[in-house]
Image (cartoon, rainbow, N blue to C red):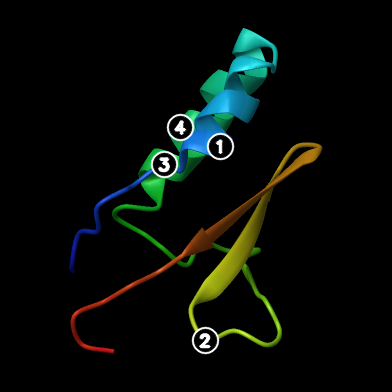
Amino acid sequence: MASYRIEWKASAVKELRALPKTVVARIVTAVESLAHHPFPSGVVKLVGSDHVYRIRIGDYRVVYTVESAFC
């Protein structure tokens, strides 16, 4: 299975810094797991875009893009 690289936007990093450390740890762990499994259960493909998805992590949502050399 292919492994993907995680790239954080500067705005996402800034928002993470404002959250409680326990929440940040959960979000970072979930995002890092996307490198090996980019389509976990509960993933939602956003309407109107080809490669943008959303996952829920507690009360938070993470929006991410999956780019592949084979697309």
Estimate the x, y position of residue 18 in percent, counting from the top left: 68, 16
Tag 3: Cα neighbours inside 10 Å, few (<14), some, or many (≥20)? Answer: few
Image depth: mark 3 or mark 4 in front = 3
Residue lying at 33% horizontally and 72% vertically, measured from the top left: 67
Q: Which residue is mark 3?
A: 8
Instruction: Please name the amino acid that badge 3 sits on.
Output: Trp
Report how far apart the C-alphas of labels 2 and 3 lie in the structure. Answer: 20 Å
Question: Which is nearer the N-term, disc 1 or disc 2?
Answer: 1
Residue lying at 47% horizontally and 36% vertically, measured from the top left: 10
Q: Find residue 22 and report its image quarter.
A: top right
Secondary structure at badge 2 equals loop
Question: Which is nearer the N-term, disc 3 or disc 4?
Answer: 3
Report how far apart the C-alphas of labels 4 and 1 lie in the structure. Answer: 15 Å
Q: Residue furthest top?
A: 21
Q: Which residue is mark 2?
A: 50
Circles 3, 1 touching at the beta carbon (< 8 Å): yes
Report how far apart the C-alphas of labels 3 and 4 lie in the structure. Answer: 13 Å
Disc ID at residue 12 = 1
Instruction: Please name the amino acid that badge 2 sits on.
Output: Asp
Q: Which residue is mark 4?
A: 29
Tag 2: Cα neighbours inside 10 Å, few (<14), some, or many (≥20)? Answer: few
Report how far apart the C-alphas of labels 1 and 2 lie in the structure. Answer: 21 Å
Q: Is residue 64 left or right of residue 34?
A: right
